[in-house]
Each structure stands twice: as C-alpha cells, then as structure tokens.
Amino acid sequence: MLLESSWFFLWGLLWAVFFMTDGFDFGVGTIYPFIGKTDRDRRVMINSIGPLWDGNEVWLLTAGGVTFAAFPQVYATMFSSLYTPLMLILFALIFRGVAFEFRGQIDSPGWKKFWDICIFWGSFLPALLFGVAFANIFAGIPFDGEGLYHGNTLKLLNPYGLLGGVLFVLLFIQHGANWLAIKTRDELQQRAIAVSAKNWLVLVPVAVIFLIYSFFATDLYDNYFKYPILFIVILIAVGALFATRYFAVKQSYFKAWFASAVMIVGCTFYGIIGLFPNLFPSSIDKAFNLTAFNASSSPLTLKIMLGVVLVAIPTVICYQVWAYHFFKDPVTQEDLDMEEAY
C-alpha cells in the first residue's frame, strides 16, 4: 500500500512540475501575438523560452511514461476516454515546436505570420485542454467496468470542464507574463507587466469560483474534511496567488515568477490530494474507479522503477536548475544576432 501511495504522489508531482515549467512557455505563447508588436519583440519572446521549452516538455513525457509503467490500466482508459483532446494537445505541441524552428528560416511576412499563428494555438490549446481534461477527471469520467467510455468529446466541454480550462489558461498567462518581466526590457517588459496585472484581476475571481464549484461538482473536498491539515495546500496556493502580485508591484519579478510557480504546483496538488486514492474516477459508478491500488503494476515493477526514478529525477532537476541559472539574464540584441538564435 505504501508503494502504490508513493507512486501516486510521484505521478502527481511529475504533472505539477510539468505545469510549473512548461506553463510559462504556454503563457508566453498565448500572449505572444498580443504584446509582440514587432518582429524583434516576437523574436525576443521566442528566445526568452528558446533554450528551455524543449527541456520543460520532458516532464510531460515523464508523466505519461510513469502513467504507462506504474498504472497501465489508467493509461489505457485515460487515452481511450480522452483520445481527442490528448491528440489535439499532441499535434498542437508538434506544430509549436516546428514553428519555433521554422519561423526564422525564410524572411517573408506571410511565412512568419503562419508560424506565429502556430505558436499561439500550439500554446493556447494545450493550456486550455489540459485544464478541461483535469477538471473532468476531478469530476469523474463516464466509463464502465470494462474501461469503455460512455460519451463523446463534447461531453467533456461541460461548464466545470471549461472553467478548469479557463483557469489553466489564466494561470499560465500569469506565469508567462512574469517570466517575460524577467527576460525582457523596455516597452516589451512594460507590456508584459501590464498583462500580469490585468490577468491577475481576472484570475482571482476565476480561482475562487473554481474552488467553490469543485465543492458541488466533485468529491475533492472529502479528503480535506477528513484530514483538515490538508487545507494548508489550498492556503499555500492562495497565498502564492497574492504573493505573485505583491512581488510584481515591488518590481521583484523573479520572486513574482517563483510565486506563480508555487501557485501552479499548489493548484495541481489541490486536485491530486483531493483525488487520492483515485487516479481516474468514474462518474457512472464509484465501483469502476481506477485507484492507485487496483490499477497499479506489480510490486516488483514498482520497486525497480522507484529505484530508477529516485536517481533520474534529481539528476534532471539539477540539470534544469543549471540551465535556468545559465539563461537567467534578459534577452539582448547580441543574443538575437547569434547564429543559433530563433
């Protein structure tokens, strides 16, 4: 039981790290066409995430791999039930990555405009659809004891699911705007700061509505009422939400970005803790729920994987900390003139 619970925590942690790291990439891409007024502005925005975005997406592969290896039944049911949104996310991420590489290959307004569109949709759609998918998981997916999905894609676009999608988009915009406040200067930086301030005013009420709606639409609060100490996770997320604005006002932009990172991790664990031990709950019958205990791999498999993960994940984290430190400075004209720049 301890082994399965540990893997449940690791599964949630990997999703939280993915949303924390790739979240600001999605945020930058979402506001990209709105505050990138010139070609230079847009190049600066792309290069602000250029050395990091592909490394950030490694966490998505890791989260998907852990789901497949540790909870294969969940992987099978999840990818059949959420097939359409997950495939849309996949293609959006592919086009976004290609857009980063291809945009600067031809000096043509039409060519760049096409890839600019791909960067926007390749950032906005995953942010929205991940939110829709996880909100639906929180509420329960209509699948039976055989793992067969009883519904269609439109059924996922329910009010609670869409609210989750909007929340994710706003969280990532906040995170991305804070990142640009660190990595840019002059007018572009001021536009990013303005987006951060305006977005925060929308994010706060949406987050409050989502927390209240979750009480009626899901069973997430059962664990919190059973163990009230867990409410500290929600308090941390809320505190980080206000801290990100406080530090932005103080012009401590790295602290504002770090606070938004904590906010995203807190929001993710709010849902993960509320789900436990369910990984993929059924809205048809709770007897069909896939949990950390009835959908996991064999104990031997989990033990071997745990040993590998306990070595690999700290190594990856150390590398990423080094990469973030190495590329911490604002993007300059000298950076844009380099041959390997986007």
Image (spheres, rainbow, N blue to C red):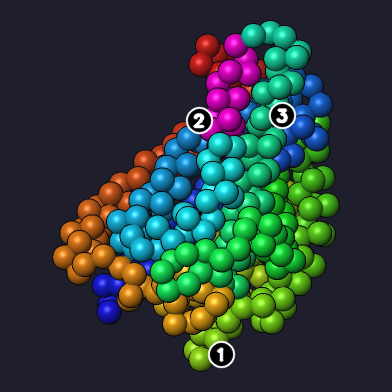
On screen, residue 184 above or below 124:
above
Could you give the CA–CA distance between mark 1 and mark 3, rounded to whole angstroms?
45 Å
The residue most toward the bottom is 226
Could you give the CA–CA distance between mark 2 and mark 1, rounded to whole angstroms?
43 Å
Give the image location of residue 180, x and y in percent: 68, 39
Which numbered tag is attached to residue 51? 2
Mark before the other along the chain sequence, 1 or 3: 3
Give the main secondary structure, helix, strand or loop, of the magenta stretch: helix
On screen, residue 227 above or below 10:
below
Front residue (pair 150, 340): 150
Under mark 3, the amino acid is: Ile
Judge depth for marks 1 and 3 and give the one in front: 3
Tell me where the magenta segment starts and ends, as one range: 93-105
Under mark 1, the amino acid is: Phe
Judge depth for marks 2 and 1 and give the one in front: 1
Which numbered tag is attached to residue 117? 3
Give the image location of residue 246, x and y in percent: 73, 60
Give the image location of residue 272, x and y in percent: 50, 70
What residue is drawn where x is 51% and y is 69%?
143
Classify mark 2: residues with Cα within 10 Å, few (<14), some (14-19) or many (20+).
Answer: some
- As for residue 94 lying within the magenta part, the answer is yes
Which numbered tag is attached to residue 185? none
Mark before the other along the chain sequence, 2 or 3: 2
Determine the secondary structure under disc 1: helix
Under mark 2, the amino acid is: Pro
What residue is drawn where x is 54% and y is 56%?
82
**Residue at the disc numbered 1:** 225
Mark before the other along the chain sequence, 2 or 1: 2
Q: Name which quarter of the figure residue 293 lies in.
A: bottom left
Q: Name which quarter of the figure residue 247 lies in.
A: bottom right
